[in-house]
Image (cartoon, helix red, strand yellow):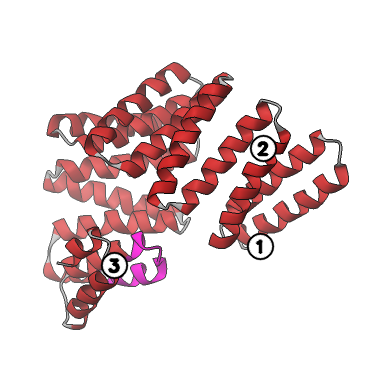
């Protein structure tokens, strides 16, 4: 019932159902689902409490399956908290359990998440191997949503290595599946990824088209953080096309959103982009002031 309410957008009602179950003692499954709900809602500390309890109960109940699911979910939470080392430990523990249980879906999900961590460390060959292993499982199981995610991440790995033709092919495959599944958030993401591929090629018109499509979808969905990234990407395209005034407008829109969201990492990037624009205009004093704002934002993000 709580899951149904959450999907319907009735998050307050969904949480009331979760809370009632937790107060009543709950089971490992209840605490696991509540932890996932809280993670997706951005309440990471509360999610950690629920998932820790889920792991304890799963161990007490002797449920290896729930223990595996809890480790997978905990890994995603730790990753969201930038605790990458512990996140990888949780994903690998989940993977070992899923292998023991012969649960192919869990194996695919664990490998995909491990791949993302490897990619962020620059271990692109290892990351791609994980993604392709997940893809082989998802194709065999007919898990089209998993296949779309796998294609997308393989595309990112290829793009990072400079294989733009291969990257575009993967992103287009992911886009085609998610359009059919009507996973609109993912459709927006794929448009953004295709925009980045075209930007790297120097195809400014193509990049602007893709980023614009991503922005329209994100505005419809009300995804403010994604909108800030879209405005920033459009600003970079306009700089490349020589439209500094238009670029500044885009970056300031991104700043307005990220100031509301208190996304310090995004703010640091936006201020750096504005500083580069001011440098191009020859206004070095303005550029230095903006770089100082970027430095302060980055300090807030890094907690220094």
What whole-number distance in Å separates the C-alpha atoms at marks 3 and 2?
A: 37 Å
Tell which circle, 3 or 2, labels the residue nearer the N-terminal end.
3
Say what secondary structure mark 1 lies in: loop
- Placement of 48 over or under 109, stated as above or below: below
- Residue 255 or 97: which is nearer the viewer? 255
Q: Residues within 10 Å of mark 1 (few under 14, many from 20)?
A: few
Q: Residue at x 49, y 25 (%)?
A: 197
For the point 51% across and 21% down, the residue is 162
For residue 288, side relative to residue 220 (left or right): right
Q: Residue furthest bottom?
A: 23
Label 1 with label 2: CB-CB less than 8 Å: no
Point out residue 269 in the picture as x, y percentages from the top left corner: 64, 46
Q: Position of residue 236 (x, y in %)?
A: 63, 34
Span colored in magenta = 38-55
Please tell me whether residue 205 belongs to the stretch shown in magenta. Answer: no
Residue at the (21%, 55%) spot, across then down = 68
Q: Which label is found at residue 19?
A: none
In the rendered view of the protein, which quadrant contains the C terminus?
Answer: bottom right
Q: Position of residue 89 (x, y in %)?
A: 36, 52
Please name which of the two marks, 3 or 1, marks the residue nearer to the observer. 3
**Is residue 13 found left or right of 193 in the rendered image?**
left
- Is residue 50 covered in magenta? yes
Q: Is 259 placed left or right of 64 in the picture?
A: right
The label on residue 11 is 3
- Residue 226 seen: yes
Question: Helix, strand or loop at disc 2?
Answer: helix
Query: Circle 1 is placed at which residue position?
Result: 304
Is the magenta region chiefly helix, strand or loop? helix
* Horizontal and vertical percent position of residue 249: 66, 43
Q: Judging from the image, what secondary structure is the residue with disc 3 in?
A: helix
């Amino acid at each position: 019932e709580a899951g149904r309410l959450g999907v319907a957008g009735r998050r307050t009602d969904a949480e009331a159902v979760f809370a009632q179950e937790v107060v009543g003692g709950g089971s490992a499954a209840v605490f696991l689902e509540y932890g996932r709900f809280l993670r997706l809602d951005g309440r990471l500390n509360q999610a950690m409490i629920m998932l820790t309890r889920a792991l304890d109960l799963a161990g007490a109940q002797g449920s290896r399956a729930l223990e595996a699911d809890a480790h997978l979910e905990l890994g995603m939470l730790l990753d969201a908290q930038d605790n990458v080392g512990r996140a990888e430990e949780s994903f690998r523990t989940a993977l070992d359990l899923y292998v023991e249980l012969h649960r192919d879906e869990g194996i695919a999900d664990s490998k995909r998440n491990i791949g993302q961590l490897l990619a962020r460390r620059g271990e692109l060959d290892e990351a791609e191997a994980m993604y392709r292993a997940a893809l082989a499982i998802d194709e065999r199981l007919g898990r089209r949503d998993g296949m779309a995610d796998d294609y997308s991440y393989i595309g990112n790995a290829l793009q990072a290595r400079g294989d733009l033709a291969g990257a575009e092919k993967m992103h287009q495959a992911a886009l085609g599946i998610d359009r059919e599944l009507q996973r609109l958030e993912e459709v927006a993401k794929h448009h953004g990824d295709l925009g980045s591929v075209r930007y790297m090629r120097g195809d400014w018109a193509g990049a602007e088209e893709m980023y614009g499509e991503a922005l329209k979808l994100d505005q419809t969905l009300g995804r403010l953080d994604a909108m800030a990234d879209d405005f920033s990407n459009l600003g970079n395209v306009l700089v490349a096309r020589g439209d500094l005034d238009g670029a500044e407008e885009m970056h300031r829109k991104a700043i307005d959103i990220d100031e509301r969201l208190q996304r310090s990492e995004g703010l640091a990037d936006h201020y750096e982009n504005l500083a580069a624009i001011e440098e191009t205009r020859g206004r070095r004093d303005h550029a230095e002031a903006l770089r100082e704002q970027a430095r302060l934002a980055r300090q807030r993000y890094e907690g220094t």
